[in-house]
């Protein structure tokens, strides 16, 4: 339990800010207290970004810290301690990681407590009462983690007990209905706020399947390999990955992601997709794989599917 100075005039709050309506409302509820200085904290990674949080923080005049946790999240995704959701999303592990990182900042920069916009019962896996208490315990934030929107339904923080935060100004929202949040948005004159959506690509079933295949073939996958999964059409030939660009923009990204020993294939005499071959095995690539990549390149250019005069350009990346 932290030492509390009861005569302290202002508290410093580090608020885990996603940019969604719940986190915006959590900020506004704490601002009513008048004696709390709030700084937002947003995490970004190869699986989710900070774009919405930056946009909404600017809109509500919130100072925002952004921390990249890509390497930590990738380790967790490969081997989560508390399992996955419907996709490859290790939500409990991820939440604990974020809170632990937030606690490090709290100690280093002398914040008093951490808060978030979580609502009891809104998400069945991570926001039931057991899960909320579980992540609080595992991140060692007992009595200094506040959820303003559901605080009256949860245990008091030390700051509420000492009267530094007025519990009567906090809320008791629960469940998946958004009626109270929408009503509060009107009260605070919040307009054009974001609709609920999953910002983490790990909850996407199609992406999760591609990620699962990758980790099955190549458990040592790094950030570049993950980013490659976000674009193109994907095919496996043993432990060799073939990725076909779907448009001009994806072709550009494939060129940027290409690394040493990758192959890039495109048609010389017709416009069309760029195809990348990445070898996840030690042996050399067989000619049959190159031929398959050529066929896929031609097939996904509908105007050239039946043509017999196609010439291909094959480039092996020697350095990156």
Image: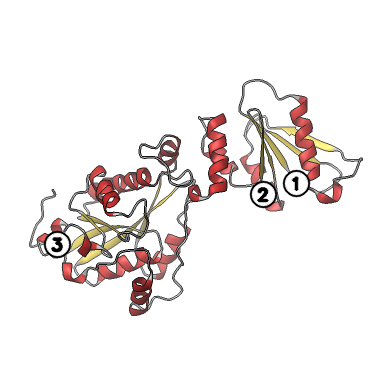
Marks 1, 3: nearer the viewer: 3
Disc 1, disc 2: CB below 8 Å?
yes
**Which one is nearer the viewer's eye here, 9 or 170?**
170
Q: Tell me the SS state at disc 2.
A: helix
Residue 94, disc: none
Q: Earlier in the sequence, mark 1 or mark 2?
A: 2
278 w.r.t. 18: above or below: above
Residue at image position (24%, 50%) is: 133
Residue at image position (33%, 75%) is: 184
Horizontal placement of 231 versus 290: left or right? left
Residue 62 makes an appearance in the image: no
Q: Earlier in the sequence, mark 3 or mark 2?
A: 3
Residue at image position (29%, 49%) is: 131
Horizontal placement of 103 versus 243: left or right? left
Residue 189 makes an appearance in the image: yes
Q: Position of residue 232 (x, y in %)?
A: 66, 46
Residue 250, disc: 2
Q: Based on the displayed image, in which of its 4 quarters is residue 299 positioned?
A: top right
Marks 3, 2: nearer the viewer: 3
Mark 1 vs mark 3, CA separation in Å? 60 Å
């Amino acid at each position: 339990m932290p030492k509390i100075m009861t005569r302290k005039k202002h508290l410093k709050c580090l608020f885990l800010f996603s940019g969604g309506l719940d986190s915006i409302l959590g900020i506004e509820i704490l601002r009513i207290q008048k004696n709390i200085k709030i700084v937002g904290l947003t995490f970004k990674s190869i699986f989710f970004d900070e774009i919405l949080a930056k946009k909404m923080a600017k809109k509500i005049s919130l100072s925002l810290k952004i921390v990249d946790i890509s390497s930590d999240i990738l380790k967790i995704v490969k081997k989560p301690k508390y399992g996955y959701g419907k996709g490859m999303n290790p939500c409990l592990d991820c939440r604990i990681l974020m809170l632990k990182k937030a606690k490090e900042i709290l100690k280093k920069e002398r914040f008093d407590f951490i808060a978030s916009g979580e609502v009891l019962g809104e998400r069945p896996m991570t926001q039931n009462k057991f899960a909320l208490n579980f992540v609080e315990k595992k991140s060692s934030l007992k009595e200094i983690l506040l959820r303003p929107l559901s605080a009256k339904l949860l245990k008091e923080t030390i700051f509420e007990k000492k009267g530094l935060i007025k519990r009567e100004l906090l809320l008791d929202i629960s469940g998946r209905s958004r009626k109270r949040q929408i009503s509060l948005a009107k009260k605070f004159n919040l307009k054009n706020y974001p609709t609920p959506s999953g910002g983490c690509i790990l909850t996407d079933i199609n992406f999760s399947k591609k990620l699962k295949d990758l980790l099955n073939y190549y458990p040592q996958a790094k950030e570049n390999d993950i980013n490659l999964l976000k674009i193109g059409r994907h095919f496996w030939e043993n432990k060799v990955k073939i990725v076909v660009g779907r448009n001009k923009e994806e072709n550009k990204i494939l060129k940027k992601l290409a690394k040493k020993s990758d192959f890039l294939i495109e048609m010389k005499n017709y416009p069309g997709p760029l195809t990348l071959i990445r070898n996840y095995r030690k042996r050399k690539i067989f000619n049959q794989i190159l031929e398959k990549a050529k066929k896929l390149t031609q097939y996904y250019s509908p105007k050239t599917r039946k043509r017999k005069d196609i010439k291909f350009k094959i480039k092996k990346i020697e350095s990156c």
